Amino acid sequence: MKVALYARVSLDETDKEKERYQEPENQLGPLREFCKAMGWEIISEYVDRASAADHGRPQFRLMMQDAMLRRFSGR
């Protein structure tokens, strides 16, 4: 199966001083491992650094466009 991965963090990853540091890799690493265990091929990875309430997240929109073009499968 061809799949895509999506990770989103709310804060800028450089904000380490206030202990609010978030790194998309914390999400992507386990997702990659799961896909490997399942034998799935990762076609693309999408990462946004924005609030989930932000409907203009560019990578989310690109992922949805790629899904409509069937660049990866959902089952």
Image: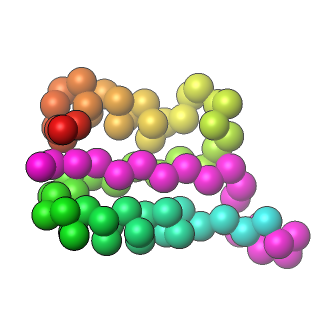
Residue appearing at x 68%, y 40% in the figure: 51
Q: Does residue 2 lie above or below 35 as drawn?
A: above
- Residue 56 sits in which quadrant? top right
Task: Locate residue 53 relative to residue 7 in the image: left or right.
Answer: right
Residue lying farthest to the right in this orientation = 18
Residue appearing at x 73%, y 68% in the figure: 21
Tally the numbered discs.
0
Instruction: Please provide percent x and percent y for residue 72.
Output: 18, 40
Residue 15 lies in the magenta-colored region: yes
Instruction: Please provide percent x and percent y for residue 45.
Output: 34, 54
Q: Nearest the camera: 5 or 55?
A: 5
Residue appearing at x 30%, y 65% in the figure: 34
- Residue 19 sits in which quadrant? bottom right
Residue appearing at x 43%, y 30% in the figure: 61
Which segment is the magenta one? 1-19
Task: Locate residue 66 relative to residue 55 in the image: left or right.
Answer: left
Residue 75 lies in the magenta-colored region: no
Instruction: Please provide percent x and percent y for residue 16.
Output: 78, 74
Task: Locate residue 68 relative to residue 22 in the image: left or right.
Answer: left
Rendered image coloring scheme: rainbow
Q: Does residue 37 lie above or below 59 as drawn?
A: below
Position of the C terminus by quadrant: top left
